[in-house]
Amino acid sequence: MDAHPLSLYELNALVKRSITSCMPDTYWLQAELSDVRSNYSGHCYLEFVQKEPRGNNLIAKARGTIWNNVYRLLKPYFEEETGQAFVAGIKVLVEVSVEFHELYGYSLTVLNIDPTYTLGDMARRRREILKQLDEEGVLTLNKELELPLLTQRIAVISSATAAGYGDFCNQLEHNPYGFVFYPRLFPAVMQGDRVEETIIAALDTINARRDDWDVVVIIRGGGATSDLSGFDTYDLAANCAQFPLPVITGIGHERDDTVLDSVSHTRVKTPTAAAEFLINHLRSTAETLEDYASSILYAVTTQMEREKTRLTRLVERIPMQTRMRLREERYRQERVIRQMEVNLQSRLMRESHRLELVEKQLGSLLQKKLTEENHRLRFLEQQIKAASPEHLLKRGYSITLKEGKAVTDASCLKGGDKLVTRFAKGEVESIVITDK
């Protein structure tokens, strides 16, 4: 056992001297930021981590510090170059010196940063998101939508206080052609951690009444370019790519497109450029309609001239056509008259022949009828003769008459009545002497 043990401070001081002598240089370090905090003094305190290539398990970790004099230069430089906020979750390439403090222990002091490394990592992440969307078959869905001819009902996703939103509305309202637009704001946070969440919520609200809108415009103006990371997320890109209305983005930057820009129907640089795009689109529609109107007017005018010329020719041909028609009608009438005469003569001959046949048939029928009636009359004559009083008298019957009327009931007679009794031959008179 050592007869003179070291104190903790002495041991840490030894470690510090050893590290300083062994690692006097600066080193370029690739790592991910898992924590970024700045305090009132302007210093920035970091935590660097390294994860397993195929998982999220940490395999290395170290504290880091960026002193105020470096941080106030390094942070704006990094964000200006990358368009990415200097926050946790990004990968960086930084120049560090290895430090060891007797009280605070091991740490890395950041002296410089290479934005191109982070840009490469951001580009890689964008490529991965776009590749995933492409594999899912949704990458170009929004681009394939047809922009309506009249894009006047505009659902605007932006911050209510953003200067870009005011510029956008002002540009639409005071367009040089007098077109009328109907923009409506659906508020969302356009920078920070809630970009994805609030824009997706606004899209959901619009989608609930999508028949009320022609197009969606996502605009952002007046914010720092370092706040664009919220537009590079998979969920936001997937929502926009599959949205049923065309999405136009104008989020105020001129660098590489964000993932949101890549999946939107149309990408412009600024909110005013988005307004100009919509105005120009409506102007193009108006010009197309004006061309159609001119074409229709020309076609109608040309057709009317042709019809007028045709009508003039027809009017000129009317007298000749009338004379020809009258001549044709006269010939037709003559033919009809001749045909009627022929038909009449033929009909007369047919009717005359038919009358002769009817006459012969009537003569035969009349003769037959006369024979039948003559036979019937003789039969009746015989019946009448058989029933006549003379015939009955000849058979021995007599008839008694009173005042010229036949007596059929003796009770009708009284004494003194004169009767005449008629026989087949002669008659006698008698007087009733008995009063019954």
Image (cartoon, helix red, strand yellow):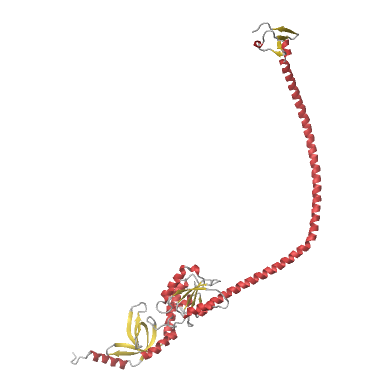
Seen from the viewer's position, the closer of residues 22 and 64 is 64
Residue found at x 71% / y 16%: 387
Asked if residue 162 can be seen in this view, the reply is: yes
Quadrant containing the C terminus is: top right
Residue found at x 77% / y 34%: 358
Give the vertical position of 372 relative to 411 (above or below). Answer: below
Q: Quadrant of residue 116?
A: bottom left
Quadrant containing the N terminus is: bottom left
Residue 363, position as x, y percentages in the image: 78, 30
Horizontal side of residue 280 vs 303, given as left or right: left
Residue 283, position as x, y percentages in the image: 58, 75
Residue found at x 75% / y 24%: 373
Give the vertical position of 229 relative to 387 (above or below). Answer: below
Residue 201, position as x, y percentages in the image: 43, 72
Q: Quadrant of residue 14?
A: bottom left
Horizontal side of residue 203 vs 277, given as left or right: left
Image mark count: 0
Give the vertical position of 39 relative to 363 (above or below). Answer: below
Most distant residue in the front direction: 416
Asked if residue 116 can be seen in this view, the reply is: no
Residue found at x 72% / y 67%: 306
Give the vertical position of 57 relative to 23 (above or below). Answer: above
Residue 37, position as x, y percentages in the image: 35, 84
Seen from the viewer's position, the closer of residues 113 and 265 is 265
